Amino acid sequence: MKNTSLCYIEKDGRYLMLHRTKKAGDENHDKWIGIGGKFEAGESPEDCMLREVREETGLSLDSWRFRGIVTFVSDEWGTEYMHLFTAHSFTGTLLDCDEGELEWVEKDRIPSLPIWEGDKIFLRLLDERADFFSLKLCYQGDKLVRAVLDGREELI
């Protein structure tokens, strides 16, 4: 199992998105995702998220919120625990990312981009809920086959 972080940085009704196009063997190749990556030894979820944001974007976050845990179960990629954050305050200047192209995308346009089906669920939850949530997403290949919210509510 792997631990990852993912942050959606918001500005003026838009999220900073990464179109993953440059990294070989990337399970997210050609998808649009937030900013994040895998934990390094000794990191907390916050440590990982702050490092990944700095490395991938050049931005330093001033404030953020830990919003949820997303458990991905995949017949191809194994199990992943993703620690989900949002942020609204930052400093710095965007730099070129070696994993893809960074773009500020209107939040309502994101579902029409090539994203994982489960991402549509947790992006909706980020907009609709202020509380912390747990979401389990089960995939067979690229197909989302099960989504369970807070261990009890089947969403599909």
Image (tube, helix red, strand yellow):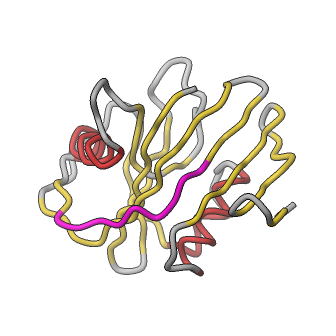
The quarter of the picture where residue 61 lies is: bottom left
Q: Residue pushed farthest left?
A: 92
The quarter of the picture where residue 5 lies is: top left
Does residue 122 show up magenta in the picture? no
Bounds of the magenta span?
62-70
Q: Quadrant of the image for the C terminus? A: bottom right
Instruction: Determine the residue positioned at 68% across, 48% down.
Output: 116
User: What is the x, y in percent for residue 149?
Assistant: 72, 62
Instruction: Determine the residue positioned at 78% across, 55% down.
Output: 147
Tally the numbered discs: 0
Q: Is 13 placed left or right of 28 in the picture?
A: left
Q: Residue pushed farthest top?
A: 25
Q: Is 142 placed left or right of 10 in the picture?
A: right
Instruction: Determine the residue positioned at 16% across, 65% down.
Output: 62
Q: Quadrant of the image for the N terminus? A: top right
User: What is the x, y in percent for residue 71?
Assistant: 63, 44
Q: Nearer the viewer, residue 51 or 105?
A: 51
Q: Is 112 placed left or right of 88 in the picture?
A: right
Q: Is 119 placed left or right of 95 in the picture?
A: right
Instruction: Determine the residue positioned at 58% across, 32% down.
Output: 29
Look at the picture and state if 33 lies above or below 99.
below
User: What is the x, y in percent for residue 66?
Assistant: 40, 61
Does residue 65 show up magenta in the picture? yes
